[in-house]
Image: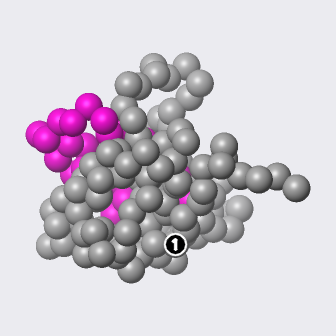
Amino acid sequence: MESSNVISMSVADRPLPTSDAQPTAASMSILVCTTCASTWQNGQRVGTSGGEQLLNRLETYLAEHPTGAIAVAPTQCMSACSHACAVAFAAEGKHSYLFGDLPHDRADLDQTVEAIATCAALYADRPDGLLAWAERPEPLKNGVLARIPPVGSLVVR
Ligand code: FES
């Protein structure tokens, strides 16, 4: 779903954050791809995508288990389309992670959401955001697609 043809049709039902968005006091953000696991008919997205279902469930979970440290940001394609569902962790001064292959079937969704929230809490507590394989919840152990160092840590040549 990464072709420009498809992307131009990928309009999420929710507005994306803009520069006018209120700043958040959260120490990290979970970016959730809302176009992952979409169903297409005649070039149009139909129904609620797997990513939107995951987003909705994650927002509900975090509202029921508030930490104040975690914000959720819906986003569109993060170029991990063949690894739906995809989420990313990001925070200023920390490594960023892109996770894929997160189970999003109805039967798996609660476990996936709990795993994301648990792992995000670990991430929020770490000054550098680094997450060891062994400490990550099961759905986030093998699905790491990228770990990107914080911009401020880069040595530019
Ligand atoms: S649709 Fe491309 S990463 Fe979700």
At horizontal 82% and vertical 52% (from top left) the residue drawn is: 156
Q: Amino acid at mark 1?
A: Leu
Is residue 114 something that shows in the picture?
Answer: yes
Location of mark 1 (residue): 145
- Is residue 81 or residue 96 the one in the foreground? 96
Relative side of 66 to 133, left or right: left
Q: Residue at x 25, y 43 (%)?
A: 59
Q: Nearer the viewer, residue 89 or 1?
A: 89
Residue 108 % position (x, y): 19, 72
Examine the rendered structure and indicate whether residue 34 appears above or below residue 93: below
Residue displayed at 41% across by 75% down: 143
Quadrant of the snapshot with the N terminus: bottom right
Span shown in magenta: 49-78
121 vs 10, left or right, is left
> Which residue is the extreme one toward the right?
157
Q: Residue 66 magenta-drawn?
A: yes
